[in-house]
Image: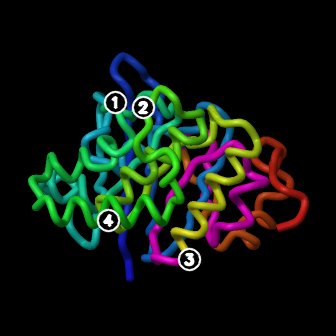
Amino acid sequence: MEILKIEDLSFSYPLCEKKALKNISFTVERGDFVTVCGATGSGKSTLMRMLKKELIPLGELTGKVYYKGKDLDTLSEKETTCSIGFVAQRPEEQIVTDKVWHELAFGLENMGLPKDVIRRRVSEMTCYFGIEDWFEKSVNELSGGQKQLLNLASVMVMQPDILILDEPTAQLDPIAASDFIATLSKLNRDLSLTVVITEHRLEDVIPVGNKLLAMENGEIVKYGETRSAISALYGNKTLIEGMPAAV
């Protein structure tokens, strides 16, 4: 089942002649784990923000993004908040409350859900992510890896269908980064959660994804099944650099 469809999407930032995105078109099926790769400035982060209505930057935008066949522009804030999750690079910037359990409940409370539903969902995610030991802690006591895991749990408590992540391990040490990617893989397997991620640690993320989208200068160079996409990229030194030797 098609969950996302991007159709001839182009974007340029204000006062910038060069387009950040050029004629981007691709589809994402339910349960896909899509790794978006490319050099710095290739348009990866801009593309991620195009998939989350509230995060689309100012600029000139043409083309369409469809979520389950609906134009993203027509969806309500409630629909996009619940259905499309987003995790950014810097853990601290996404945390808005003082305590771990407050953070987990915050989004649900804003949606006006009943207290029993909030308690049940928070309890489920606390157990799933194994954060019982620091459930009562201040967020200031957490490590970078714990903060990013909390961000992920706070998104998942909303029960999204698709998760968009923009360099989520950029601020994490190698062990925390590997654990975070392993958790994403588990969510993808256990819940059939659709994942679209940009990530510089390709050796960790490419082996767990089923699709690869390679970008260069704001354009898609290759999109498809991971192994075949990587094979097609050999010869492109810019894109193949950093790819794991065996996939």
Q: Which mark is residue 189?
A: 3
Instruction: Give how far across and how far down residue 221 sits, in percent.
Output: 63, 54
Instruction: Give how far across and how far down residue 166 sits, in percent.
Output: 51, 43
| Magenta-tinted stretch | 190-218
Q: Which mark is residue 98?
A: 1
Q: Which mark is residue 138?
A: 2
User: In terms of sequence position, does the residue under pointer 4 or pointer 2 come before the other?
Assistant: 2
- Locate the C terminus by quadrant: bottom right
Rounded to the nearest whole Å, what is the CA distance between mark 2 and mark 1? Answer: 6 Å
Where, by quadrant of the figure, is residue 17 drawn? Answer: top left
Q: Which mark is residue 159?
A: 4
Q: Which label lies toward us, 1 or 4?
A: 1
Instruction: Give how far across and how far down residue 55 sits, in percent.
Output: 31, 38
User: In terms of sequence position, does the residue under pointer 2 or pointer 1 come before the other?
Assistant: 1
Q: Which mark is residue 238?
A: none
Colouring scheme applied when the structure was drawn: rainbow
Instruction: Give how far across and how far down residue 178 sits, in percent.
Output: 71, 52
Kind of element beneath mark 1: loop
Rounded to the nearest whole Å, what is the CA distance between mark 2 and mark 3? Answer: 31 Å
